[in-house]
């Protein structure tokens, strides 16, 4: 409590120093003291929630906020306080250059490319299952971003399998829009990347991480599945055999993937960053008007 109080006091001094009008909070431990400081100074407060539940900081600050921008519809979170804006993604995500992306990775125009990734750090169980499932699978090309932590041992595993030419292993891809642009199908966890998959129109097989806070990955995956953009493979059912079976079925069903791609684009909100900015700037403008303090 003492640390939180000290952090709030420091945040007050900083907000006064920069003459802030509105604070935009993205959740996390740092957002709490700054949000409290904003309200104690009578400043505007806009929160952003990027997953299928409100994190602790946003839950505590929401009653004080003028507006809460949420990435997807949440039960009981209704206007005017709550506004579904989507989650901001890099602008290039919504406009991938497929030809350039495939040239970068050496993937032919007619190849069916399956993108496998588990977030910035990777996902060990998913990484291991993917290599076991696809190192000998010739029906598709695999572009696998595994995270730096697992790259060396996965490289050895692929070498032991004969270094299959259709398997492209990378620790990380930057910009990630290139990986999305090359993909016909993605196999991934269901964190914030689901919003990038939607923006890029990439159909997906999602394997939600079962220990995510408040099981938010299951909620993210459910949103994609309900929208027709994804299918789910529970982590408890993840095995090389099951993964290969699910992926090969989708690889062979071009029409289904096309429908899923269209559904993903329908869910996407590529203007999310602009909408969130408009909320914050609009609030600042209204509060600058004579007597203007309402949201």
Image (spheres, grey):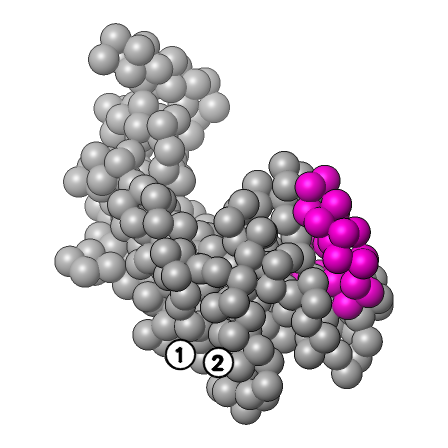
- SS for tag 2? helix
In the foreground, 152 or 209: 152
Q: Residue at x 38, y 19 (%)?
A: 11
- The answer to whether residue 144 is above or below residue 31 is below
The CA span between labels 2 and 1 is 6 Å
142 to the left or right of 45: right
Magenta run includes residue 206? no
In the foreground, 225 or 126: 126
Q: Find the magenta span and give its range.
A: 152-180
42 to the left or right of 137: left
- Residue extending farthest bottom: 255
Magenta run includes residue 176? yes
- SS for tag 1? loop
- The answer to whether residue 40 is above or below residue 227 is above
274 to the left or right of 184: left
Q: Which of the labelled discs sits on residue 228, or is there none? A: 1
In the foreground, 179 or 235: 235
The crowd level at tag 2 (other Cα within 10 Å; few <14, some 14-19, many 20+) is many
């Amino acid at each position: 409590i003492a640390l939180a109080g000290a952090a709030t006091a420091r945040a007050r001094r900083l907000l006064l120093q920069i003459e802030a009008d509105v604070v935009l909070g993205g959740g996390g431990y740092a957002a709490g003291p700054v949000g409290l400081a904003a309200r104690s100074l009578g400043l505007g407060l806009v929160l952003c929630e990027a997953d299928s539940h409100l994190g602790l900081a946003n839950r505590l600050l929401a009653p004080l906020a003028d507006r809460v921008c949420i990435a997807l519809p949440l039960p009981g979170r209704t206007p005017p306080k709550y506004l579904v804006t989507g989650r901001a993604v890099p602008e290039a995500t919504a406009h991938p250059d497929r030809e350039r992306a495939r040239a970068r990775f050496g993937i032919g125009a007619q190849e069916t490319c399956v993108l496998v990734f588990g977030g910035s750090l990777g996902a060990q169980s998913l990484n291991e299952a993917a290599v076991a499932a696809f190192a000998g699978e010739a029906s598709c090309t695999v572009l696998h971003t595994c995270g730096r932590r697992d790259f060396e041992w996965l490289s050895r595993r692929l070498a032991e399998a004969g270094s299959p030419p259709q398997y492209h292993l990378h620790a990380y891809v930057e910009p990630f829009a290139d990986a999305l642009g090359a993909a016909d199908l993605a196999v991934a966890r269901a964190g914030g990347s689901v919003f990038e998959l939607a923006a890029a129109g990439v159909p997906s097989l999602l394997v939600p991480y079962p220990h995510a806070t408040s099981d938010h990955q299951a909620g993210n995956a459910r949103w994609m599945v309900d929208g027709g953009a994804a299918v789910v493979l529970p982590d408890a059912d993840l095995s090389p055999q099951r993964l290969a079976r699910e992926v090969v079925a989708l690889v062979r069903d071009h029409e289904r993937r096309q429908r899923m791609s269209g559904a993903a684009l329908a869910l996407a909100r590529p203007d999310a960053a602009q909408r969130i900015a408009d909320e914050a700037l609009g609030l600042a403008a209204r509060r600058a008007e004579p007597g203007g303090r309402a949201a």
